[in-house]
């Protein structure tokens, strides 16, 4: 758990409220860097680190996908996983307005609204996974099942 109340993000407060154990990792960073570089800075195994992708469906609904940092989303699989005809990346200019988070600090926990969320099935077999903590410079390590529970997500095959 985070030690200082000032360093807590909304995502951490939600995890605390729901009594979900996590470990916060902080690093110095003033602007967006991709998940691979973040993992390298923190000395983390790439297979444990996941990124959050926000999409918009054919129906104009928003969907969140949590996928390994070294993989790409498969838009056809992703659309099937949420019952849509198609999904595409949410334009970068809309990310903060839709999620409440900035690029590089976006996490499935504590968005402005709870959108339909899918976690890549590769996470289901992990003891711990690492996701953004809700702002640039913070990563959270937690059990995939706990992330699934707090976000109402399902595991699905959504990567290429």
Image (cartoon, grey):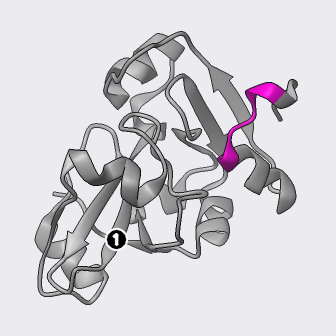
Q: Main secondary structure of the magenta part?
A: helix
For the residue labelled by badge 1, is the local secondary structure a helix, a strand or a loop?
strand
Q: In the rendered structure, does residue 8 fall within the stretch colored magenta?
A: yes
The image quarter containing residue 97 is bottom left
Q: Residue at x 47, y 13 (%)?
A: 29
- Can the viewer see residue 122? no
Q: Which residues are magenta?
A: 6-11
The image quarter containing residue 151 is bottom right
Position of 129 relative to 54 (above/below): above
Q: Residue 145 placed where, x, y %?
A: 64, 64
Q: Residue at x 84, y 51 (%)?
A: 16
Q: Which residue is mark 1?
A: 63
- Can the viewer see residue 130? yes
In the picture, measured across the screen, residue 35 lies left or right of residue 56, that is right
Residue count near mark 1 (Cα–Cα under 10 Å), binned few <14, some 14–19, many ≥20: many
Q: Residue at x 26, y 90 (%)?
A: 83
Quadrant in the picture for the N terminus: top right
Q: In the rendered structure, does residue 103 fall within the stretch colored magenta?
A: no
């Amino acid at each position: 758990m985070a030690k200082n109340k000032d360093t807590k993000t909304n995502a951490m407060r939600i995890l605390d409220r729901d009594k979900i154990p996590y470990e916060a990792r902080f690093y110095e960073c003033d602007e967006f860097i991709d998940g691979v570089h973040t993992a390298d800075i923190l000395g983390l195994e790439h297979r444990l680190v996941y990124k959050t992708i926000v999409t918009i469906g054919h129906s104009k609904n928003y969907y969140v996908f949590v996928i390994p940092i070294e993989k790409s989303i498969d838009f056809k699989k992703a659309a099937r996983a949420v019952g849509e005809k198609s999904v595409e990346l949410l334009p970068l200019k809309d990310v903060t307005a839709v999620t409440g988070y900035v690029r590089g600090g976006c996490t499935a926990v504590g968005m402005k609204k709870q959108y339909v969320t899918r976690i890549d099935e590769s996470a289901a077999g992990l003891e711990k996974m690492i996701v953004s903590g809700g702002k640039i410079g913070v990563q959270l390590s937690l059990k995939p099942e706990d992330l699934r529970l707090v976000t109402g997500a399902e595991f699905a095959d959504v990567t290429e």
